[in-house]
Amino acid sequence: MPSSCCGCLSQYTHHHLVAFLLTFFSYVLLHASRKTFSNVKVSISAQWTPSLQNDSAPAFSPGETWEDNRLFSDEKQATLFLGALDSIFLFSYAAGLYLSGVIGDRVNLRYVLCFGLCGSAAVEFVFGTLTEWLQIYNIYLYCGLWVLNGLLQSAVWPCVVAVMGNWFGKTGRGFVFGLWSACASVGNILGAFLASSVLKYGYEYAFLVTSVVQFAGGVVVFFGLLTSPKEVGKEGLSLESETGLSPVETDTDSHRPLMSDEEDEAEVYDRPYQSVPSPDEPLAESPPAVGFCQAFCLPGVLPYSLAYACLKLVNYSFFFWLPFYLSNNYGWKEAEADRLSVWYDVGGIIGGTVQGLISDFMGKRAPVLGLSLVLAMGALFGYSRSPNDQVINAVLLATTGFFIGGPSNMISSAISADLGRQDALRGSQEALATVTGIVDGTGSIGAAGGQYLVSLIQSKLGWMSVFYFFIVMTAGSIVFIMPLLLKEVQAMWRDRRALRRQL
C-alpha cells in the first residue's frame, strides 16, 4: 500500500517543481490555442460569407469586393466546413500521436516538445492571422494548415507525460498526475479568456495573442526543462542540505509501476539518482527503445486504449458541443452558455485530483476508474433531464464533469505512466512516450469519429438520444477495462487475506 501523499510530497526537490510547472503550462498554452478556434467560429463564419455582419469591408460595397472575400454562399456551408476542420484536426492529431510517441522515446523529449509547441504556434499564426492580414482565403490552404497543426500538436502530450513519468514515481503518482492533468481544463479557461479579450478587434488578433504566448512558452521550455533526473547531474542531486534527503531517498521508485504485483523487488534502474555517472566516468549506454508493436502488446495497453476511445468521445463531445447544446436546448444567450460550460471543466479538475488520490491510497487504479464510470452513467442520465435553471444545471454539469473528466484525466496521464513503467519492460524502459501516444491516439480516433455521430444523432433523433449514446459509450469503456478491474479486485482480496493471516 502506498504511503501518505504528504510524506510522498516531502521527497520532491525544486527540480520536480520546475518539471511539473513547465510541462503543466506547456499543455495549458496548447489547449488555450486549441480552444481559440472554437471561440471564434462565429466571427470566422461571418468573414467567409457575404453577409451584412461581415466587417471586412465597408457596408454596401460592390459585389466584386464581396466575391474576393467569400468562400461560401451562406452561413450553413461555412459551419459545415468549420466542423470538417474539427474532424480533420482530430484525425491528423490521432495519427500524429502514434508517430510522435515513438519519436519521443528515441529523440530528446525537450527537442520534440519545443518543436511541437513552436511549430504549432507558427501554423496557427499563419492560419488565423497572416491569411487575414494578406486577404488570402483558400479552402485547401486552410485544410493543409490544420492537418499540419494536428500533427505538430500531437508531439506535445506524449512528451509531457513522459517527462512527468521520469520525475515522479509510483508513490503518489495518482494524486500528482491527477492535479497535473488539470492542465487541459485550465487551458480551456485561459483560451476563452484570451480570445474574448481581443475578439472585438477581429478574430485574427485572438489567433495572434494565443500563438505568440504559445511560441514564447516553447522557447522557455527549450531553455528551462530538464526531462529526467539524469540531466541534473550528481552535484544537483546530492545536496542533502538543499532537500533534506539523500539522493536515493529523494526518488527511489520513480520508475516502478503501480500496476505490478511485484513492486517490492529492488531494481538498479529504479534508482535513477544513483545511476548518474561522475564527469570522469563514461556514460552508460541507454536501454533500447521499445518498438510500436511491442508497446501495443504490453499488458493493459489495448484495453485502456479502447476504453479511452469510448471515454474521450464523450469528453470531447462536451468540449465541442456543450455551449451549442445549452443555447439550442434552453434558449440561453451564447455568453451565458459559454460561462456555464466552464463548470464541466471545474468538475473534471476536481475529479481527476480526488480520484487519483483515492487510487494512491488503494494501490489500484481500475476499481476507482470502474466505480466512477458507473456513477458517470447515472450523472449523464440526470443531466439530460436538467430543468431550465442555470444553478441546477451548473451543479449537474460539474457532477458529470467529475465522473467523466476525472477518469479521462486518469487514463491519459497516471495510468499511461503506469503502463509505460511496468515490469514487462525490464531491461528496456524507454516506452513511456510510445505507450502514451498509443493510448491518446486511440482515444483521439474515437473522439474524431464521435463528433460526426453526435451531429447525425442530434439531427435525426434529438438531444436525448445523444445522451443515451453517451451512456452506451461510457458502458463500453467499463466493458473494456473489466478484466483488469477483476484482476485488481482479486489482488486486493489476496492482500487482505494475507494481512489477516499475519495478524
Image: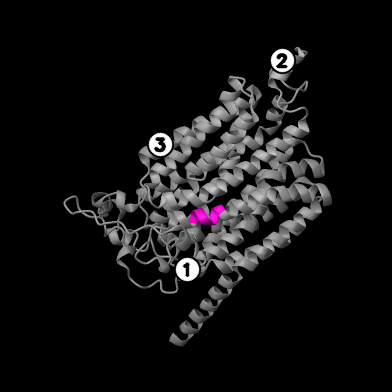
Which stretch appears magenta? Answer: 436-441
First of labels 1, 2 by sequence position: 2
- Badge 3 or badge 2: first in the primary sequence: 2
Which disc is residue 220 wearing?
Answer: 3
| Residue type at tag 1 | Met
Q: Is residue 119 above or below residue 137?
A: below
| SS at badge 2 | helix
Crowding at label 1, few (<14), some or many (≥20) Cα neighbours within 10 Å? many
Where residue 203 appears, as percent x and y from the top left, is 63, 27
Q: Earlier in the sequence, mark 1 or mark 3?
A: 3
Say left or right for 325 vs 435: right
Is the Cβ of the residue at disc 1 closer than 8 Å to that at disc 2? no
The residue at which mark 1 appears reads as 259
- Could you classify mark 2 by the number of other residues whose Cα lies within 10 Å: few (under 14), some (14-19), or many (20 or more)? some
Q: At label 3, which amino acid type do we have? A: Val
Residue under label 2: 65
Q: Residue at x 25, y 57 (%)?
A: 284
**Cα distance in 3D space between marks 1 and 3:** 34 Å
Q: Secondary structure at mark 1?
A: loop
Query: Is residue 195 at least partly visible in the picture?
Result: yes
Q: Is residue 136 above or below residue 443?
A: above
- Number of the label disc, if any, that sits on residue 412: none
The x, y position of residue 315, in whole percent, is: 65, 52
At numbered mark 3, what does the secondary structure look like: helix, strand or loop?
A: helix
How far across and down, in percent of the image, does residue 116 sit?
A: 47, 40
Left or right: 491 with respect to 253?
right
Q: In screen coordinates, is 68 left or right of 230?
A: right
Please tell me in which quadrant of the rendered image residue 385 appears. Answer: bottom right
